[in-house]
Amino acid sequence: MNAPVLSRRLFLASSTAVGGGLLLSFDIGSEAQAAGRATLSAYLKVSPDGKATIASKIPEVGQGMRTALPMIIAEELDVAWEDVVVEQALADTKVYGRQVAGGSMATTLEWDGMRRVGAAGRWMLIQAAAGRLNVPSSELSTQPGRVVHASGRELSYGELAQAAAAIAPPDPKTLTLKDPKAFRIIGKSHVQTDNEAIVTGKPLFGIDVRLPGMVYATFLKAPTYAAKVAAADLAAAKAVKGVREAFVVEGGAALDGLLPGVAVVADSWWAARRGRNALEVTWADHPTSAQSTASLAAKAAEFAKGPPQRTARADGDVPAALKGAAKIVEAAYDYPFIAHAPLEPQNCTAHVKDGKVEIWAPTQNPEPGRALVAKTLNVPPENVTIHLIRCGGGFGRRLVNDYMVEAAFIASKVDAPVQLIWTREDDIQHDFYRPGGWHNFTAGLDAKGDLVAWRDHFVSFGEGETFVRSGGMNSSQFPAGAVANYQHDVSVMPLGIPTGPLRAPGNNAFGFVIQSFTDEVALAAKTDPVEFRRKLLGQPRLIGPPDQNDSFHTGRMRGVLDLVAEKSGWGRKLPKGSGLGVACHFSHLGYVAVVMEVSVAEGKVKVEKAWVAADVGRQIINPTGADHQVQGSILDAIGSTLHQKITFENGAAVESNFGDFPLLRMSEAPPIEVHYLLSDNRPTGLGEPVLPPAPAALCNAIFAATGKRIRSLPVGDQLA
Amino acid sequence: MAYTLTVNGSAHTVDTEPSTPLLWVLRDLLDLVGTKYGCGVAQCGACTVHLDGVPVRACVTPVSRVGTKAVTTIEGIAANPVGAKVQEAWKSLDVPQCGYCQAGQIMSATALLVATPKPTDAQIDAAMDGNLCRCATYPRIRKAIKSASGQAEA
Ligand code: FES
Ligand code: FES
């Protein structure tokens, strides 16, 4: 049951590196993407001193890809990790040409390609050695950093690098890859390459950028999204010592563009902040000024009572199956809007001079930012240079470049480089939120306790058949395809609040509702929750077409479910007030099952321990990085499930900082046991699929401990 | 107002308002950018520095209150043998994810270990609960503190 090889193409080009040696440039993507590209997006350089430099312009947001991808290349190239230099390519357009969007170099897409890049370099070095030693290349092999002949003669990569530069790269498809059993680097933990700089406080992040003559800015926007400035008294702000300028920004109506507001520019950020505090601004009325969490919930409740706007999927005959069912289970679930809150507030540094725009941005997705800046400032896109800076957390927030266009626009009015830094309050109140949603479930069980019908009426935001960004739901969510009668209904209402992807978009909510409701159905069927899921998964098989990303293999899920049940001691007796909860969910090509143990005392939940079993294919590339992603995802989910919500009043967010939008703290973080189930499938990513099952595992454990079913997030004080 | 501060062992004179938080004096006036801004209201710990060895939140510490107390930032913590040990543990146990919170974490952990060389889990929780990590590296932080204190992780 091998997944098909991806239809992405690898492009290779060789040349002599500056300073000598082999420069192997490469790119992965469609032909159309690479066509006309003067330079490829990443490179491998083998220098005369034997060092292998690997550079990519993919933004690092803490996902550890800047360590994992070079590991894959180094493995196949066959060099010692100590001889690998990972270069922080700051997306210098002069060197790299146009930048590709962040996220495209994820494990899933690049595993095979990166191996072939390394193997191509090794092949070229072997060809160079064959020439030098005048032997057939078939008699040559490699040891880390050198080519070895059967006779014992050998040449180091450094000695061969220059000659290899003259050799045309091979067709990647023809290369022989290493036997995984011979891996020296892949599968062993390698610490992040930037650790030294991080622990010594070196400038690394967007807010650390320093340019000669740089000034600092703050930008005040209306609490109601896109409301215009009706009147602004700037005098008091301008009177603050250190403030250079304060001006109104007209802005537009698009929520992901430049919004109206008032900019304050000063010699230091603190002066800009004080200037902003002194502003007197009146905001114009806006059509969404009356929007509130309560008004949205009231509308959703109306929808729940009536027929859906449309049915997105209907297998079998749900109404008939429900009529004939021995037992019917109904429950309504909802979850709130939540913010990303990366610890580094949004910021960007920009310099506009002679029609050219230079930008230093912590962004996950520079290309749309470039387009937005070019359009807003009315300059050609090629006049916009973007330097990619390490992000102090992303979680999807920095896929949108609103702060980039703000910095560029403010800089276009100032004769100096400008560093815009948002306050934390700006960040929490002007996010592209994970949208809230409502799911109205009905399930039918037959006399044997088997699931015969499943219906989800999903109420979300959008217009017609279009959802707001990250407000959509696919109709292939399990148990789709595993139950004869399945219906996915949808109703949407308009929304005037910015939304966007948050770690495991969509699935971070669907995992909660589906796996919680599955627990309710299992209880109604008087079946153990793990046993009920096993029955539902049934025989190992693929649901959906073989080459589709949302096709679901029941056997792989069964594997992780069994493993987590075994490791957590599922079924063991716990004292009163404690409980175990289970959940499993498929997303981003990963199969993950989670068990949590909680205790509840005086209305407070304590997660005692979490167990995770994950199947992301046959190879964990960098175990230390993988564990980081798994543990981080579980803790992320515990934090949001217990504490987080954004509420809206008068069209604006109420919460504003970590006091009312709490992140998980040290004392709340349980030990987490991580198990990987290595299956014979291609390696896929781990940054997202672990999160979705966690909220339901937690809430199902709360039910086991207390008998209280959590159907609305966050848990908050519902147990008090 | 002019203030003379001792930062990481050397004296610096800055001219600023008395209410300017030490955080922005360090970042914007002294170009010591290792100390981070996360919330501005003593909720996240990203801005943690030491005043005479005591961890404080620089975002809510007005420059006028620093006086003659020695300021230590992440850039200077290696001069403290405990600080150097903590940094080593952080690197070798691969604590950071995005890394943004870690300067503050290291400053809090160093202060903890100076005062309590062999902290219990509860003492670690108490000392570190004010330092948020959005990437949730808490299990590694705990492990690194234990390792730096010479205690094996249970
Ligand atoms: S920035 Fe000082 S505690 Fe958050
Ligand atoms: S490592 Fe990212 S906030 Fe802590």
Image (cartoon, coloured by chain):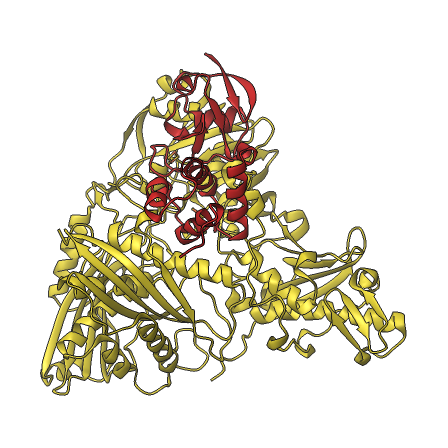
Chain colours: A yellow, B red
Residue at horizontal 80 percent and vertical 80 percent from the top: A138
Q: Kindly give the residue lying farthest to the top in the view shown.
A: B1
Residue A304: percent from the left, percent from the top? 14, 64
Residue at horizontal 20 percent and vertical 40 percent from the top: A650
Q: Quadrant of residue A119?
A: bottom right
Q: Report the quarter where the C terminus of chain B lies.
A: bottom left
Residue A408: percent from the left, percent from the top? 50, 37
Left or right of A434 in this view: A60: right
Q: Is residue A349 visible?
A: no
Residue A387: percent from the left, percent from the top? 58, 44
The front one of B12 and A487 is B12
Vertically, is A471 above or below A353? below
Residue at horizontal 86 percent and vertical 77 percent from the top: A151
Left or right of B123 in this view: B144: right
Q: Is residue A214 visible?
A: yes
Left or right of A254 in this view: A605: left
What count of labels does the image hold?
0
Vertically, is B118 above or below A278? below
Q: Report the quarter where the N terminus of chain B lies.
A: top left
The front one of A550 and A180 is A180
Residue at horizontal 72 percent and vertical 58 percent from the top: A45
The front one of A43 and A555 is A555
Q: Quadrant of residue A660?
A: top left
Left or right of A707 in this view: A467: right
Residue A483: percent from the left, percent from the top? 25, 82
